[in-house]
Image (tube, rainbow, N blue to C red):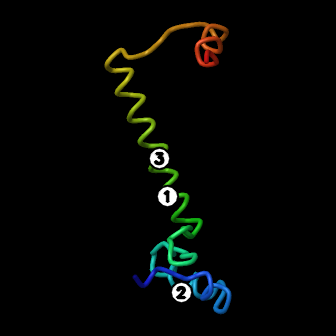
């Protein structure tokens, strides 16, 4: 894969190799001893993925509300419920 960077290559080529990969919009995957271990993305791409994650949470919450799958309780009752082991 063109977007995989070995730890050794990262040591020799540095950030320029990551820039080269992420400039195309791809994620750079850093491989350590033949195992893919890390993913590097641009901040713009990261923010986009975070926005997608938040939008999915809003959709899920609206679906729960529409189904009536909610709990009405006081703050104290909520804290007790979520901290039970």
Label 3 vs 2, first from the N-terminus: 2
Point out the residue furthest to the front here: 33
The residue identified by callout 3 is: 53
58 sits to left or right of 78 = left
The residue identified by callout 1 is: 48
In contact (CB < 8 Å): disc 3 and disc 2: no
Image: 15 above or below 57: below
In the image, residue 79 lies at what x, y percent?
Answer: 65, 15
Q: Nearer the viewer, mark 1 or mark 3?
A: 3
Residue at image point 61% right, 81% down: 7
Label 1 vs 2, first from the N-terminus: 2
In the image, residue 28 lies at what x, y percent?
Answer: 51, 75
SS of the residue under disc 2: helix
Q: Nearer the viewer, residue 5 or 79?
A: 5
Label 1: few (<14), some (14–19) or many (≥20) C-alpha neighbours in 10 Å: few
Image: 80 above or below 15: above
Label 3: few (<14), some (14–19) or many (≥20) C-alpha neighbours in 10 Å: few
Residue at image point 44% right, 43% down: 55
79 sits to left or right of 6 = right
SS of the residue under disc 1: helix
Q: Nearer the viewer, mark 1 or mark 2?
A: 2
Image: 85 above or below 30: above
| Quadrant of the image containing the N terminus | bottom left
Label 2: few (<14), some (14–19) or many (≥20) C-alpha neighbours in 10 Å: few
The residue identified by callout 2 is: 20
Residue 69: image quadrant is top left
Q: Nearer the viewer, residue 12 or 70?
A: 12
Image: 7 above or below 48: below
In contact (CB < 8 Å): disc 1 and disc 3: no
| Quadrant of the image containing the C terminus | top right
Label 1 vs 3, first from the N-terminus: 1
């Amino acid at each position: 894969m063109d977007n995989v960077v070995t730890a050794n290559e990262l040591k020799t080529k540095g950030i320029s190799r990551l820039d080269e990969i992420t400039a195309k919009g791809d994620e750079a995957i850093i491989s350590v001893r033949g195992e893919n271990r890390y993913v590097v993305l641009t901040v713009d791409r990261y923010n986009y993925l975070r926005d997608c994650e938040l939008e999915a949470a809003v959709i899920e919450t609206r679906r729960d509300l529409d189904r009536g799958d909610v709990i009405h309780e006081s703050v104290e009752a909520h804290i007790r419920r979520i901290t039970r082991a």
